[in-house]
Image: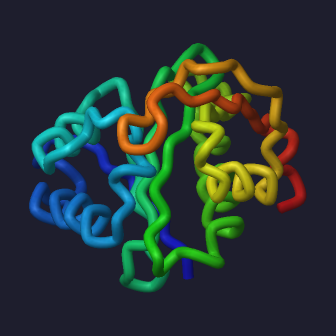
Amino acid sequence: MINIIPYVETKKGWSIPDDHMIWIFTKMLKQGLVKKTFPAGLILTHHDWMDLVKNKAHIVHIITNEKTVVAVTWLSNIGHNHAFCHFCVFREGWGKSKHMARELLKKLFSYKGHGGEPLFDVICGRTPANNRLALKMLERVGFTIIGKIPDICLDVYDCGKVDAVFSYIKREATHGW
């Protein structure tokens, strides 16, 4: 069973303890996923990671299958009805990523603003063109690929400047899932 757990600050502290969030970053390191998840080289340590997930401009979720952490996602660049989605799927989630992504999108599209209106109508993606697995997943999930902008992503581990592939999915596309 897929569970989507928001990482939020409450009056009592964060919904997931810091040591568990650091463990998630350590899991990324052990599975060799940090370079693909953060190709610009800006997230190198668990301190960098904690700064990212505690940034109030981001909405972070942990995805579990039973009790195993299988993915972590976060929204950034949140606008009046849209946000950009980022994700890291662990080995334990491979082969389940379409189902997990669809469950996450249903949850994101269910969020309401202060007046009761939907918080998000569109979820966007900006994916480095050399991340073929991520691009395949986006297509399987139902994202529309808009096209590429040359040389605007940085991959310090592979080839320097990389094209960015832009994509989106609208709330309406998720009806019937």
14 sits to left or right of 151:
left
Q: Where does the C terminus fall, quadrant-wise?
A: bottom right
Q: Nearer the viewer, residue 94 or 11?
A: 94
**Viewer-nearest residue: 134 or 15:** 134
Residue 158's x, y, as percent? 44, 43
What residue do we see at 18% from left, 49% from top?
A: 14
List x then y, in percent, for residue 96. 63, 75
Q: Is residue 163 left or right of residue 75?
A: right
Q: In terms of depth relative to the viewer, which is nearer, 170 or 95? A: 95
Point 33% across, 53% down: residue: 34
Snapshot quadrant of residue 148: top right
Q: Tell me, yes or no, if residue 6 can be seen here.
A: yes
Residue 10 appears in view: no
Picture quarter with the N terminus: bottom right
Q: Which quadrant of the view contains residue 70? A: bottom left
Q: Position of residue 122 (x, y in %)?
A: 71, 30
Q: Quadrant of residue 2?
A: bottom right
Residue drawn where x is 58% and y is 20% of the image: 151
